[in-house]
Image (tube, rainbow, N blue to C red):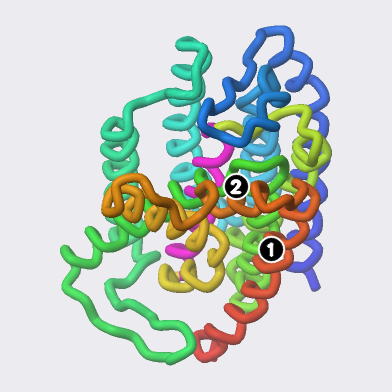
Amino acid sequence: MKMILQLLIAFIVSLIVTAAVGYFLVPALSRAKAGQSIRQDGPIWHSGKQGTPIMGGLMFIAGITITCLVVGFRSMLAGDFRHIFILTFALVFAAIGFLDDYEKLRKKQNLGLKVKQKFLLQLIVSLAFVALMRLTGNLSSSLYIPFFDISASIPEPIYIVFAAFVAVGTVNAVNITDGVDGLASGVTLPVAIWFGTVAGILGYLSLGVFAAALAGGLIAFLFYNFHPAKVFMGDTGSLFLGGAVCAMAFALDLPLILIPLGIVYFVETLSDIIQISYFKITKGKRVFKMAPIHHHFEMCGWSEYKLFAVFTTVSAIFAVISYFGVLGRFA
């Protein structure tokens, strides 16, 4: 009961702080003319979003950070720093996203850091995080396989490299999902609730505090980001979310759960890969009307409301399925 209360407090504190920060941040970003440049090859109706402020992810980053430091203080006194490791990892990715957003604003176009620059920075951060988790005893080199309830022992160097690439892939998958008002937030909300639930069952208070803070921050952010969006989270926010989701999976020593739990991220990324590969192989033909797949459904006539509802529901359904996939781990 005491743990549930702490998680509820973390959720409420993050929601209130995020909403309050957003109240001041959105007008400030508008005054600073920190507006989004819309992709020229994107859906033509997205042109109306031109100039919508970006970097809105700063509001839930602030809410989550304050919550982790305040509500998670007792955990730190007890020597449990899981939530701080997760927060730090997510914040470093947010910093990379901030640089990307800044470059977009400076160039006044939808092109920020070069792909190679982003990949290298993300890979270095991921390798450092995985190594830190191993050194502190929060991550084993044994890979748990959900639904089969077995673990495969992997040589440590290979596991660290594997884990780093999983981290980079997850972060960029969440980033790709952020293409429609509220979509990345809606899809990530069931994921955050899943991690909070599992952390509560296992008694991992600090991890639960972070997950609850993430859920509260995302709900508050949706006040501003739901269609029609008053602000976008930008790469600052989407890379933070990707880092947070990935870090929570590693903190539970369950990286492979990201496949079913993050099924929407996975499908979004796969649709992009299929589209690009098929386009190159056939010299101009396409599988989807537009990629990633949320744009395909837009071209099929789906409204942003319908996209949000369907994709969020799919994420929630797979969160429930994923829970049954790790029951053996709890035992």
- In this view, the residue in front, 311 or 166, is 311
SS label for mark 2: helix
Q: Residues within 10 Å of mark 2 (few under 14, many from 20)?
A: many
Give the side of residue 281 with respect to residue 103, left or right.
left
258 or 283: which is nearer to us? 283
Tell me which amino acid carries mark 2.
His
- Asked whether the viewer can see residue 135, the reply is yes
Q: On screen, 258 above or below 300? A: below
Magenta stretch encompasses residue 54: no
Q: Which residues are magenta?
A: 235-252
Place of residue 252 in the rendered image (x, y in percent of width and height, measured from the top left) = 48, 69
Q: Residue 98 vs residue 69: left or right?
A: left
Percent coordinates x, y for residue 257 in the rendering: 48, 73
Q: Give me the residue at 67% from left, 17% from top.
A: 51
Query: Pointer 2: what residue?
Result: 295
The reply to whether residue 132 is visible in this rendering is: no
Q: Which of the two marks, 1 or 2, is nearer to us in this view?
A: 2
56 shown above or below 192: above
In this rendering, would 199 be left or right of 119?
right
Picture disc at residue 155 = none
Q: Residue 122 is drawn in which quadrant?
A: top left
Q: Residue 166, position in %: x, y? A: 35, 59
The correct choice, above or below, for 262 with respect to 326 in the image is above
Q: Residue 119: horizontal and vertical position, in percent?
A: 30, 39
Which residue sits at x=44%, y=23%?
A: 111
Amino acid residing under circle 1: Pro
Residue occupied by mark 1 = 190
Name the quadrant containing residue 139: bottom left
Q: Around disc 1, counting alpha carbons within 10 Å, would you say few (fewer than 14), some (14 to 19), or many (20 or more)?
A: many
Q: Quadrant of the N terminus?
A: bottom right
By secondary structure, the bulk of the magenta-drawn segment is best described as helix
Whole-Å distance between the Cαs marked 1 and 2? 22 Å
